Amino acid sequence: MKKILLSFLLMTFGMAALHAQSNDVAIKKDIKSINRQEKALKKEKKEYHKKLVKLESKEVSYQSKQQFNSDFRDASAVTWKRTNYFDEASFTKDGVRMTAYYDNESNLVGTTTAKTANDIPAAALKEISKKYKDYTIQSVMLFDDNEFNETDMLLYDTQFDDADNYFVEMKKGADELILKVDMQGNVSYFKEIKAK
């Protein structure tokens, strides 16, 4: 009887061990599958995110001008210029001077507006004052992203993912740098401006 009981127990433990091993294999397969799915999502997101396309002509696009007229009906004092990547319209709306940026398909990428240090989130101003106490704020600009266009933006000759951000120009002697402040007040280094 003891032999039968012992055989039964050994067989039960053996089956449990085999089952645990097969569970480990299944878990490892699930992890690999999840990793493949994450990679595919990252690739899809990267492909969806529109990169900058260099503009061919030197002339501002007629379509950009038409789209601007639709986007900013009450704009005045409008001046246009074409850069390597954007048709740019500088204009006044509601007494505020702004610049609108249109991509290679004449879609609005976003606008920039001059702001003051008091416009950025208080937590960001406090962090800037503490971390960059030897610097003085020279200017503040707000980039307001067009959420319906995934084209990246280019400011200060630097490309970045489109999102609403303040750009704070800082100066200490001959040293100049740009800080990026998001709408939640997170401060990050954006770029150093080299003296000419």
Image (tube, rainbow, N blue to C red):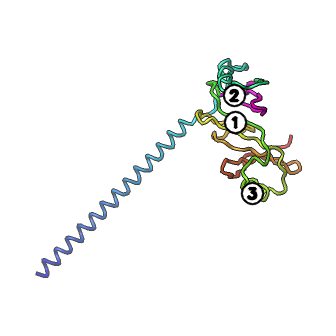
Q: Relative to 76, is 64 on the left or the right?
A: left
CB-based contact (under 8 Å), mark 2 and mark 1: yes
Quadrant location of residue 57? top right
Whether residue 78 is in magenta: the answer is no
Determine whether the residue tagged by mark 3 lies in a helix, strand or loop.
helix
Q: Nearer the viewer, residue 96 or 135?
A: 96
Q: Which residue is mark 3?
A: 127
Label number found at residue 79: none
Q: Position of residue 140 (x, y in %)?
A: 78, 43
Q: Position of residue 12 (x, y in %)?
A: 21, 70
Mark pair 2, 1: CA separation = 9 Å
Is residue 95 magenta-colored?
yes
Circle 2 sits on which residue?
86
Task: Report, in whole angstroms, how far the alpha carbon at label 2 lies from the one at label 3.
Answer: 33 Å
From the viewer's side, name the closer residue of 85 and 70: 70
Q: Residue furthest left?
A: 1
At 65% from the left and 37% from the top, the residue drawn is: 145
- In the image, residue 31 sits, relative to residue 49, either above or below, namely below
Q: Residues within 10 Å of mark 1 (few under 14, many from 20)?
A: some
Residue stretch rendered in magenta on the structure: 81-102
Which secondary structure lies at badge 1? Answer: strand
- Residue 61, image x and y in percent? 68, 19
Looking at the rendered structure, the kind of residue marked 1 is: Leu
Amino acid type at image mark 3? Glu
Q: Mark 3 vs mark 1: which is more N-terminal?
A: 3
Q: Main secondary structure of the magenta part?
A: strand
Residue found 63% across the figure and 35% down from its top? 146
Q: Which residue is mark 1?
A: 154
Identify the image quadrant of the C terminus. Answer: top right
Considering only order in the chain, which callout, 1 or 2, is on the residue closer to the N terminus? Answer: 2
Q: Nearer the viewer, mark 3 or mark 1?
A: 3
